[in-house]
Amino acid sequence: MRVRTRLATWFTMLTAFAAGASAQISLGSAVDLALRSDPRVKMSEATVKKAQAALNETYDVYIPTVNANAGYGQGFGVPTGLPTVFSLSSDSFLFNFSQRDNIRAAASGLESAQLALRETRGQVEEDVVVTYLNLDSDQRREAAMTQEYGFAMRLVSIVQDRLNAGQDTRTELLRAQRTAKQIQLDQLNLEDEIAALSDRLSRIIGLPDNQLTAVSSSIPALPSIQVAAGNGSEPDSAGIQSAVASARSKQELAFGESRYRLRPQVSFGFNYSRIDTGQNDYTTYYPDFKGKSQNAVSVGIQVQIPIYDRKHQDQASEATAEASRAHFATEDQRNQFLEGRFKLRHSAAELAAHSDLAEIDRDLAQEQLDAVLLQLSAASGSSGGQQMTPKDEQKARLDESARTIDLLNAQFQVSQAEVNLLRQTGRLDDWLKTISAMPESVTASPVTH
């Protein structure tokens, strides 16, 4: 039933997309689609297939090859070769000191490609999650900003009425109008950002030109900064492990190249040929050849010992230098990764503190708004003391809305840092697995033009 429900959900969503629809898409669906269609994943999968084929090739040199050749024609004068009508030949590789190193090099190359694929999948997952969280945050900021703009326009109306009654100055009106216009400009900028994020998300998941919106309920709770940061003893990332395996592959290859000279290479050969001298002068020049047609069979083992090959020695030196370069490049890559993770841990802690501060500011603004509303309620039945006005109420509401928007922005920055840390510590997949336990949430509706 779960499989049928998921298939029905996918069919509904894809049908809406095919019709050019505006759709809500859950985080889990976005990640699944991206891992199936992102070009970066496809390229890495092709690289794995290529590495697997390269490994198969190192074993298949031991499997005999079979070839057939045929041809017939007229010849005159001195024969230039054996008059073969058709032949069957087979040869295979039996032994080479370097081949075992070549096999190990190819196996390490396949391991490197598989780890690179895992790293690419992690990058795509991180890209989708961060884009999705950004889109969700902007959607909530847009809702808060729409409410803020309503408060700003109400303030403009109140100040205009007070100006008409001689209770306020034109300067106050201009300030109120400027506040409203700035909020409107921020709204336009936010709309552009939401459109760009929606377009980016649709392209990542392989269904471009669709208007996607995030579903907040599909986002599982992120772990704390302390949990996401780990304890510093985490293993290398898949990208670093891939680089290590690649360097090891080059070292094995260089070692095999260095063992080429003065070591025997053994191969096997077989040939059957049908010879016909009826259409040429072969018997004239080779009178001991009996008959017009004969069979020729050869079976043998060839042993070759390279004694002096300057070109191959240069290739071995080149392979050794490349292996050394790959080793040090891997060390440099690891150092940069660890340095970046160290800095991210500290910056994430700062972002968390900034988010806590933004939450306190929002709570203070809410307390101030509640106090203004309480004083307005109390002032309605009293004529003494300092009285609050609707103008003060709208200013308090504007301040509370602004602090809410700041809080949403700070919370997204913390979430982004947490996602970055989860991937760098190898825990992003564990967090994404919690999505499968959540109810699927995907709806679609046609676009109105």
Image: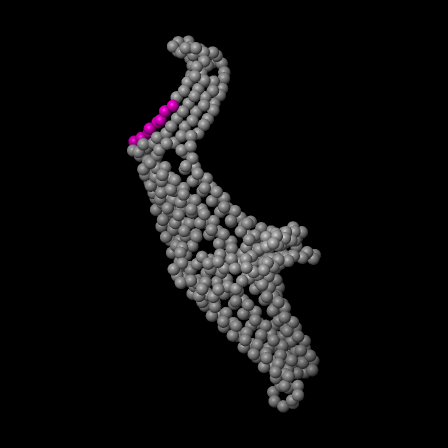
Q: Residue at x 45, y 11 (%)?
A: 292
Q: Please check the rendered image and state whether residue 284 is part of the magenta-colored stretch, yes or no.
A: no
Q: Is residue 369 above or below residue 76?
A: below
Q: Is residue 283 left or right of residue 124?
A: left
Q: Main secondary structure of the magenta part?
A: strand
On screen, residue 195 above or below 45: below
Q: Residue at x 47, y 66 (%)?
A: 224
Q: Position of residue 327 (x, y in %)?
A: 36, 49
Q: Quadrant of the C terminus?
A: bottom right
Q: Nearer the viewer, residue 52 or 377?
A: 52
Give residue 283's position: percent from left, percent from top: 42, 10
Magenta part of the chain: 299-307
Which quadrant of the figure has residue 107? top left
In the picture as drawn, the residue positioned furthest to the front comes out as 1
Whether residue 96 is visible, yes or no, is yes
Location of the N terminus (image quadrant): bottom right
